[in-house]
Image (cartoon, helix red, strand yellow):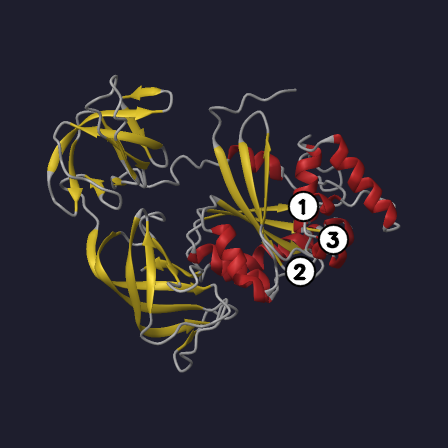
Amino acid sequence: MAIDDSNMEILRFTTAGSVDDGKSTLIGRLLYDSKSIFEDQLEAVEKSSKGKGLEHVDLSLLTDGLKAEREQGITIDVAYRYFATPKRKFIIADTPGHIQYTRNMVTGASTANMALILIDARKGILEQTCRHAFIASLLKIPHIIICVNKMDLVDYDQGAYERIVSDFRKFAAKLEVNDVHFVPISALKGDNVVEKSENMDWYEGATLLYMLETIHIGSDQNHVDCRFPVQYVVRPHSDEFHDYRGYAGRISGGIFKKGDEVTVLPSGFSSKIKSIDTFNGEIDMAFAPMSVTITLEDDIDISRGDMIVRPNNQPESTQDLDVMLCWLNPKGPVPRAKYHIRHTSNEGRAMIKEILYKVDINTLHRIEDDQGIRMNDISRVRIRTTKPFFVDSYRRNRFTGSIILVDEGTNETVAAGMIV
């Protein structure tokens, strides 16, 4: 059956868990049971499964795209997958479980509405469960679903499930996690993934797919603080649109309406919104995270990197940033070195002025005596920029509260940061 998904809501979610907790199998099961894979893909997986001497179809092979992953049976890179049901579209970031791939999880989770954290019902909460839950809370992912997997291997025991739920609730009390759901599943057998399990009649909650389809994500965006970073100035230079001057970009926060009074940063000039244009024509109102072109009643000098805001609700303009930084590069930061900084559509140069502490992502303790930052480390630093940036705290707005640092010599992204 063809699904008309042109106006459907998109849910982005990331999967995490310890090695061999069954993340790839779970995603394979979601794709398989929701009829989101092609016949030739299924045939290839069936053939590979037989080649491995397996009696069942190994659904994890649907997501482990890298040859090295297929050979080792593990995920070592962020694999993005897409599927849709009649209710919603989904983008999955399948992230690795190993500690040396913390940066991959940060990358995959940075845009997610939700995190699925898998726990092996036999093993309970492990160090990596705590690490992934901490990263999910650090990245302010609004919703978390704890999937207690491999319930078939503990004979679908209610006590084993409830012990894990209780243990995780105690740990989550230390984190800033607001919306946590739990579901007992068997990704291998399909229990409670798409269909309700007959083996766990003691579980009265929803299946995983039902949660994914119905969890409310409309209020995940900040619709209070109006933020519109300008990406591109549209000047068609055609006879039909001779005097057209529009400012294109993606709304990072708030709701913009035709006729609204707005202020442009950094100039501070004010005007009113004349029109809001989209690919499908003009609209009266737009909100985050829509991509639109805004025209103003007055001719103001605006360029890429400027920000359109409300006169009485403006971000902080600062050259000193307090940032939680995840280091992504094998080579650690060079003292007093200049980096290229990118924030929304704005760019400049910056220097790491001070390292305050590192975070032990297993115990959540601060490490203040070790200042050496290495790949996958998460630390709190002070950054000084060469020009003012218009920022909100990451807690308030994930778009205007995040930055990346780029090595000026190699053009590699070396760090991702969340403004405190």
Q: CA distance from mark 1 to mark 2?
A: 15 Å
Q: Name the residue carrying label 2.
A: 19
Q: Name the residue carrying label 3.
A: 70
Q: CA distance from mark 2 to mark 3?
A: 14 Å
The image quadrant that residue 419 belongs to is: bottom left
In the image, which is nearer the foreground, mark 2 or mark 3?
A: 3
Q: Name the residue carrying label 1.
A: 63
In the image, which is nearer the foreground, mark 1 or mark 2?
A: 1
Q: Secondary structure at mark 3?
A: helix
The count of marks equals: 3
Q: Secondary structure at mark 1?
A: loop
Q: Is residue 59 depicted above or below 377 in this figure? A: above
The residue lying at 74 percent from left, 59 percent from top is 72
Instruction: Indicate left or right for 245 with 268 as reference.
Output: right
The residue lying at 22 percent from left, 25 percent from top is 244
Q: Amino acid at mark 2?
A: Val
| Residue 261 showing in the rendered view | yes
